[in-house]
Image: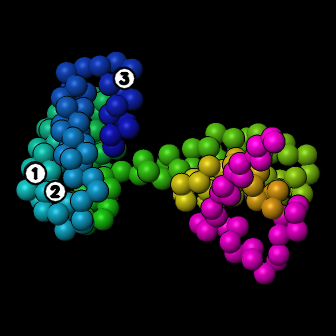
Amino acid sequence: MRRKIFDVHDGQPTELSTTAMAGIQAIYRIEEEIRGLPPAERLAARRSRTRPLVLALRRQLMRQGKGLSRHADIAKAFAYGTKRWRAFNRFLYDGQLEPDNLIAERAIRGFTVGRRNWLFSGSFAAAERSAVVLSIIETCKLCGVDAEAYMADVTERIQNDWPASRWDELMPWNWARRQEMPLPLAA
């Protein structure tokens, strides 16, 4: 819902879209404050602070949406929000949920941007290798590991006859970069 209203506002701001965006921004300011808190505390804050803002936003969408032509872009954005109101409100009843799916969208952005390029991998084997490498990179990101350093180090260790019985140590969640050995001083 936020995206639809934002797109209309960004293209052609009106008093209606500006007011709706202000209401949405107030909700997101509260979310920024409570992000990272335990679910019970987030839920309590949403019930006391966010719910009244959400209800006011719904009243605004319903009231102002009725006076618009159904073909107007802002009316379509408001209708989109009111039709999906129940799904939009779900975060008000569960402290573990986010008000949107931006976290998931950001996580897959690299894949979605490049997916057209991956159609031209050259062969099925090349596409499989790309999938493996991208999986390693994303796993490294989740583990807070520099993917380039990880792959260079693991490749070198495997080339130097790393024992197969210790491959679990090379997984991104177990990997520890080797300390660089100081060069011996010249005598």
44 sits to left or right of 180: left
Secondary structure that dominates the magenta span: loop
Alpha carbon separation for disc pair 2 and 1: 5 Å
Amino acid at pointer 2:
Arg
Q: Residues within 10 Å of mark 1 (few under 14, many from 20)?
A: some
> Which residue corresponds to the image point at 72% horizontal and 52% vertical from the top-left?
181
Chain-order first, disc 2 or disc 3: 3
Alpha carbon separation for disc pair 2 and 3: 28 Å
Q: Residue furthest front?
A: 187
Q: Residues within 10 Å of mark 2 (few under 14, many from 20)?
A: many
Which span of residues is magenta-colored? 158-187
Instruction: State the residue position of label 3.
Output: 10
> Which residue corresponds to the image point at 37% horizontal and 36% vertical from the top-left?
4
Amino acid at pointer 1:
Arg
Instruction: State the residue position of label 2.
Output: 46
> Which residue corresponds to the image point at 81% horizontal and 57% vertical from the top-left?
155
- Name the residue nearer the viewer: 38 or 166: 166
Circle 3: element type = helix
4 sits to left or right of 54: right
| Place of residue 2 in the rendered image (x, y in percent of width and height, measured from the top left) | 33, 40
Q: Are marks 2 and 1 in contact (CB under 8 Å)?
A: yes
Q: Residues within 10 Å of mark 3 (few under 14, many from 20)?
A: few
Amino acid at pointer 3:
Asp
Quadrant that contains the C terminus: top right
Question: Could you say which disc has been placed on residue 49 in the image?
Answer: 1
> Which residue corresponds to the image point at 36% horizontal and 27% vertical from the top-left?
8
Circle 1: element type = helix
**Placement of 106 over or under 177, stated as above or below:** above
| Place of residue 114 in the rendered image (x, y in percent of width and height, measured from the top left) | 69, 41
